[in-house]
Image (tube, rainbow, N blue to C red):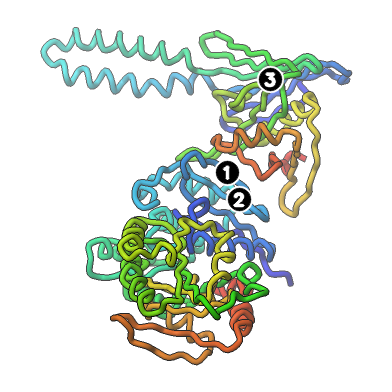
């Protein structure tokens, strides 16, 4: 049953859980790209036209043969690229058992990864800075792994959509939460002092931050409440 | 009615973990603004593996944008390349004022240009003096004219620096404020027990060993002073390309026991090195203000400096008797004080960051 739904220009977030949540009930969070099929092929349409035009310009001797070959190759290129078009990413939370991260592609292929509950140290919301933009992402610290594991590998949902998923993961992994109210924003800070060594090892990793022995996951959730 | 709180974005290519005057200035100014309740965000380029968002003391948020430096710690200038990330940071942090630092920082120029394009209030602080004759300076001055064409206010650290900035950029002098740099007097305090000056006089030099900081002058002066005064020893802290020349000088004149080379000194240890000496020597070829003199005077040392740039201003503001000496083709400006604690108290009164900050805040508002 759909308990909440958030939508923006690019993504739609759907939360499915039981009508009366019981202990051990499965919690499912979906993030779906809006208009995924049209958006995905539209991106490659112009590239295909460009390739065809370029081929016609270069192959003036026999334009019919060049046109047919270029259409064939462009179509083949579009088909290969379309395998990477993501339709939906889901997080299925099974309390006391684990979580499953699913990515469903336009071609119908689904890639899943199961993470046992014992392997999850804590979920964190981190700000990822690229040369052109900065976005929030939800990641997991896992035992025995040096790198953070992204919950949503392909999609970049907004902070509003990530916060309820992060809260649900915190509840499942048993991470202690403390809320700090500020004047302007509702900040949820998580302290995890027992993970000092792991954080020190990851000091130089990009896209997350530490401050001595604490990690802060800061969210702006004022509009959600 | 409560004063409206500002949300300031400090932009510069020069920030921690790189260490220097500009970096310290940005950090301490940010801390004071945070203490007053304003929000401060710093934007700089990535340093090695240090990319992403970091939080420093007091909740100072630092964006290490993954643009690699290409020359002298500067981001590669792309004019519009940094527009997307600058706009993203300005929007998500709801910035009200953009404060750029250092004329030599390409990231600062680009951020100021984009911020003005988007209608933000912009302030620029110039920390150094530059020439007019060489190719690099001519190019830099042209860029500066372009960037500062329509900023709201500019800040310089001395009257000399203000004159230099106004001439280089073509700004109206009425738009340029002079607010001197400050020193953290809580950190730079004289030692409880001053080192004895009966047997040995210790002269301390702490600077980057580069041409601009007069390292070549040191190579000339140290052997001469050691020859004339057998009871003088030197302590040289800092590192740079001229380190080799100083080592050669030590070898040539057999001064290993009288000239101690400390190498790079972390900022946290600078005070402990300063309080071991009696005299601080600054041999810079050009200085807009010279915070090192302030730090040394705050620690109770006699300070000797080349009379360049804004150094006389920094010295005369102490209101202490001064006299000039000509020695070995250098002009020595000596600061005299009978009571070293007077310097500390004076610098504390005039140059504490809080007082300087109040002047800066008035500028921004």
Q: Are marks 2 and 1 in contact (CB under 8 Å)?
A: yes
User: What's the chain of the residue with tag 2?
Assistant: B
Q: Is residue B338 left or right of residue A61?
A: right
Q: Which residue occupies 55% across, 8% down?
A: A108
Residue closest to the eye, A182 or B130: B130
Res. A219 in view: no
Q: Mark 2 against mark 3, which lies toward the viewer? A: 2
**Relative to B251, residue A164 above or below:** above
Q: Which mark is residue A30?
A: none
**Quadrant in the rendering for residue A58:** top left
Q: Which residue occupies 73% across, 45% down?
A: A187
Would you name the residue on which mark 3 appears? A91
Residue closest to the eye, B311 or A46: B311
Q: Which residue occupies 22% across, 17% down?
A: A55
**Quadrant for the C terminus of chain B in the image:** bottom right
**Relative to A203, residue A141 above or below:** above
Q: Element under label 2?
A: strand
The picture places residue A141, in percent across and down from the top left corner, at 67, 27
Q: How many marks?
A: 3
Neighbor class of circle 3 (other Cα within 10 Å; few <14, some 14-19, many 20+) is many
User: What's the chain of the residue with tag 1?
Assistant: B
User: What's the chain of the residue with tag 3?
Assistant: A
The picture places residue A22, in percent across and down from the top left corner, at 88, 18
Return the residue found at the far left: A61
Q: Mark 1 against mark 3, which lies toward the viewer? A: 1
**Quadrant for the N terminus of chain B in the image:** bottom right
**Relative to B102, residue A105 above or below:** above
Would you name the residue on which mark 2 appears? B61
Res. B343 in view: yes
Residue closest to the eye, B55 or A165: B55
Would you name the residue on which mark 1 appears? B53
């Amino acid at each position: 049953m759909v308990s909440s739904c958030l939508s923006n220009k690019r993504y739609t977030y759907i939360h499915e859980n039981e009508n009366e949540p019981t202990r051990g009930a499965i919690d499912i969070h979906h993030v779906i790209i809006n208009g995924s099929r049209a958006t995905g092929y539209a991106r490659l349409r112009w590239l295909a036209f460009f390739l065809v035009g370029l081929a016609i310009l270069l192959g003036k001797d026999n334009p019919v043969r060049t046109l047919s070959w270029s259409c064939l190759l462009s179509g083949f290129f579009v088909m290969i690229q379309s395998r990477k078009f993501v339709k939906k990413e889901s997080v299925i939370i099974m309390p006391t058992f684990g979580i499953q991260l699913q990515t469903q592609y336009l071609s119908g292929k689904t890639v899943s990864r199961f993470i046992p509950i014992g392997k999850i140290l804590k979920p964190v919301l981190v700000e990822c800075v690229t040369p052109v933009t900065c976005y929030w992402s939800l990641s997991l610290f896992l035992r025995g792994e040096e790198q953070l594991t992204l919950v949503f590998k392909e999609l970049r949902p907004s902070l509003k959509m990530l916060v309820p998923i992060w809260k649900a993961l915190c509840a499942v992994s048993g991470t202690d939460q403390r809320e700090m109210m500020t004047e302007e924003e509702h900040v949820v800070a998580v302290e995890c002092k027992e993970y000092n060594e792991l954080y020190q090892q990851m000091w130089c990793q990009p896209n997350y931050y530490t401050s001595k022995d604490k990690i802060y996951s800061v969210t702006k959730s004022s509009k959600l409440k | 009615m409560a004063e409206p709180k500002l949300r300031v974005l400090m932009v510069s290519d020069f920030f921690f973990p790189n260490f220097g005057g500009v970096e310290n200035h940005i950090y301490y100014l940010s801390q004071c603004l945070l203490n007053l309740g304003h929000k401060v965000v710093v934007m700089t380029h990535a340093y090695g593996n240090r990319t992403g968002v970091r939080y420093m003391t007091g909740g100072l948020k630092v964006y290490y944008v993954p643009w690699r430096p290409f020359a002298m710690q500067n981001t590669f200038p792309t004019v519009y390349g940094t527009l997307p990330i600058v706009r993203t940071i300005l929007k998500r942090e709801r910035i009200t004022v953009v404060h750029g630092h250092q004329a030599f920082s390409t990231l600062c120029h680009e951020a100021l240009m984009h911020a003005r394009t988007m209608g933000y209030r912009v302030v620029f602080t110039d920390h150094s003096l530059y020439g007019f004759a060489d190719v690099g300076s001519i190019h830099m001055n042209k860029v500066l004219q372009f960037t500062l064409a329509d900023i709201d206010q500019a800040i310089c650290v001395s009257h000399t620096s203000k004159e230099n900035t106004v001439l280089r950029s073509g700004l109206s002098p009425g738009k340029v404020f002079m607010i001197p740099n400050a020193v953290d007097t809580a950190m730079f305090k004289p030692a409880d027990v001053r080192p004895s000056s009966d047997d040995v006089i210790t002269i301390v030099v702490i600077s980057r060993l580069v041409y601009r900081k007069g390292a070549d002058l040191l190579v000339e002066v140290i052997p001469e002073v050691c020859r004339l005064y057998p009871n003088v020893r030197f302590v040289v802290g800092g590192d740079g390309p001229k380190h080799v020349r100083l080592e050669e000088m030590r070898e040539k004149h057999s001064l290993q026991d009288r000239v101690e080379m400390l190498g790079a000194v972390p900022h946290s240890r600078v005070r402990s090195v300063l309080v071991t000496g009696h005299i601080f020597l600054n041999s810079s070829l050009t200085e807009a203000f010279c915070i090192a003199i302030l730090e040394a005077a705050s620690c109770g040392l006699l300070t000797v400096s080349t009379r360049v740039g804004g150094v006389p201003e920094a010295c005369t503001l102490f209101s202490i008797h001064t006299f000039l000496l000509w020695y070995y083709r250098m002009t020595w400006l000596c600061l005299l004080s009978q009571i070293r604690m007077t310097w500390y108290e004076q610098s504390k009164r005039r140059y504490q960051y809080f007082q300087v900050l109040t002047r800066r805040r008035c500028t921004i508002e």
